[in-house]
Image (spheres, helix red, strand yellow):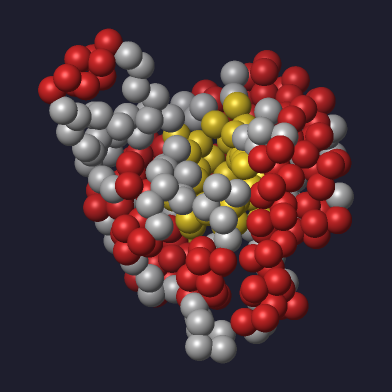
Amino acid sequence: MSCDRRGFLAAAGAGLATILLPDPLGASTGRIGSIGVQLYTLRALLPRDFDGTLAALRAIGYREVEFAGYHGRTPKQVRATLDRVGLTAPAAHVPFEALRDEPNKVLDEAEMVGHRYLVVAWLGEADRQSVPALVRTAAAFNRIGERAAARGLRFAYHNHDFEFVRVGGRIPFDLLLDDTDRQLVSFEMDLFWVAKGGADPLAYFERHPGRFPLVHVKDMAAGQRMVEVGRGHIDWRRIFAKRKRAGIEHFFVEHDEPADPLASVRESYDYLRKLRF
């Protein structure tokens, strides 16, 4: 896969503060306050009309985007477009090799665009084919996380479904969580791929609280087909009711192969905007 390609009731004393202070995450109201989108969904449109596509997302109502490549633009040009259309980009997907081999370049670009999270979204076979390989990968994640933290940034890993298939008697997702430092390495949970892998996100929220500041929101229909959010059977209310336990800060809509990218992300946005939990 190409890489170019976070309701609870507050205590009475805190309740007044909730009324008086802004609540961007919807933490006290059981709603998502700021909905984002992973731009991999719109990869067919961005090379043709980068600025217009981002402006269209803002017109739908999106406030945040997550990049998967800059489509020929420099970080400075990307930041200028974001500022002009009124979006922020708190996260970006970057290749594992780039962060491992050219960390300073990647970190410099992240600072220019305004990213807070740098996310590895794919591991090649050599980095996950055995328990020793996964242990080495976890150690590399810790080193990358330490470099990012020194610059005031965060490193995270995004799952697919292969992380839930046992390797050498271990579940790779568990190994990566257990062998990385929670102060240095966060996780972006892709809720579709967790479901496809047969795992329960709430079980991970309970065992590893606060480690999932980012989630990908995409739905699953019969036959494990990826569909727009709200069209499938994933129980979003059940999952998002535990967002504080998980540590979720950013909700990114995604669809890997949408028939009409803008129509797809508009439908998912409309569902999530109305969702209460």
In the rendered image, the residue lying farthest to the top is 20
Residue 32 in the image, given as x and y percentages of width and height:
35, 34
Quarter of the figure with the C terminus = top left
Is residue 48 depicted above or below 257 in this figure?
A: above
Relative to 95, 23 lies left or right: left
Residue at screen point 38% across, 30% down = 25
Q: Who is closer to the viewer here, 4 or 24?
A: 24
Q: Is 81 placed above or below 32 here?
A: above
In the picture, which quadrant includes the N terminus?
Answer: bottom right
Figure check: 126 above or below 21: below
* Above or below: residue 52 compared with residue 19: below
Q: Is residue 115 visible?
A: no
Mark yes or no: residue 64 visible. Answer: yes
Q: Nearer the viewer, residue 50 or 218?
A: 218
Q: Position of residue 87 (x, y in %)?
A: 59, 24
* Residue at the bottom extreme of this rendering: 168
- Seen in the image, is 209 located left or right of residue 39? left
Image point (75%, 78%), residue name: 126
Residue in view at x 26 percent, y 19 percent: 18
Q: How many marks?
A: 0
Left or right of 38 on screen, residue 71: right
Side (left or right) of 89 relative to 217 = right
Q: Position of residue 103 (x, y in %)?
A: 81, 47
Query: Residue drawn at (32%, 64%), measured in percent from left and top?
Result: 203
Expressed as whole percent of the image width and height from the top left, the position of residue 22 reads 35, 16
